[in-house]
Each structure stands twice: as C-alpha cells, then as structure tokens.
Amino acid sequence: MYRLEREQEICITIQKAWDFIRNPRNLNRITPPELGFEIISDVPDSMFNGLIIEYIITIPFFGRRKWVAEIKHIREPFSFVDEQRAGPYKFWYHYHELIKTDKGIRVIDRVYYEVPYGILGKLLHFFVIHKTLQRIFDYRAEKFTELFSE
C-alpha cells in the first residue's frame, strides 16, 4: 500500500473552496490536460454521499481507461472521500479536507493506493506511477493557486 499526502495554503474562505470542490464537474479544471479526463456519467451540481461518477482518463502506457468512483463520508464544508469502485488501481482511497487557518484555508489531500500486476506493478510505480501522481498533484496545487489567489 502506498500513500501520497499533500497540503497547500490558499487565501480563500472555506465556503468558497467548498462551493468549488463540491461540484464534480470542477475536477476537469484541476486535472492536467494530458490525462484527457472526461466525465461520462451524468453528475449533479453538488456531490452527495453515494454519488457514483464514471470517467475516462489516459494512463501512461495503458491508454484510455474507465474509472468509477464513489463519493462518501461527506462532512460539509470540511471533507469527503472519493473511492475507486472500478479502475486502474487495485485500491484507491482519496481523502480531501479543508481546514480554516488565519490566512484562509489549508487543503489536504491524502491518498492511499495499491497498484495491480504484482512485481511489474511495483516496478511501474517506482519508475512511472509515483512520478505521474506527483505531477498531477503539483498541477492541482498550481490550479488552486491560480483560481483562488485574491
């Protein structure tokens, strides 16, 4: 099992940040374009516990793959989880949290994941997957700063 954790400070109110992240369609705005992220299921303007989201994403060396995620454990306006139900990982659990600070908010992403394919998966993780996830979360941090810098 692997773990990726990121924290970022943004000068924004917690409600404004929550208003952005609770809309599943906004994930397009913070996902690197080279991933070809495309939501293929109907989604509401605001997530809810049990919401199933289907999308397609481009994975290096594997091409376009379908990913099905469930939204759960929502604590509005502070946190939620998206958990893979079907997709490229053997296991994917992504915890999102917003914490009020003196300067705005702290955005926390904590991902627990496991890769498939045994030893081949471990090698792919070492050479490709880990670096790809780092780039994705770097991009997200840049986009959050760009979208919410006041």
Image (cartoon, rainbow, N blue to C red):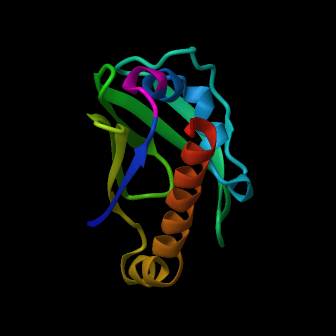
Residue located at (73% from left, 51% from top): 36
Q: Quarter of the image holding residue 80?
A: top left
Residue located at (37% from left, 21% from top): 50
**Numbered label tally:** 0
Q: Quadrant of the C terminus?
A: top right
Question: What's the magenta region?
Answer: 12-16
> Height in image: 65 above or below 67?
below
Q: Is residue 17 left or right of residue 106?
A: right
Q: Quadrant of the N terminus?
A: bottom left
Q: Is residue 114 left or right of residue 129?
A: left
In the rendered image, residue 103, in percent from the top left (x then y), is placed at 36, 39
Residue located at (50% from left, 57% from top): 137
Q: Main secondary structure of the magenta part?
A: helix
> Height in image: 49 above or below 26?
above
In the rendered image, residue 87, in percent from the top left (x then y), is placed at 50, 50
Query: As rendered, which of 90 and 19 lies closer to the eye?
Result: 19
Q: Is residue 118 visible?
A: yes
> Height in image: 32 above or below 105?
below
In the rendered image, residue 147, in percent from the top left (x then y), is placed at 62, 38
In the rendered image, residue 117, in percent from the top left (x then y), is placed at 42, 73
Is residue 133 one of those drawn in magenta? Answer: no
Query: As rendered, which of 35 and 98 lies closer to the eye?
Result: 98
Query: As rendered, which of 95 and 144 lies closer to the eye?
Result: 144
Q: Is residue 93 visible?
A: no
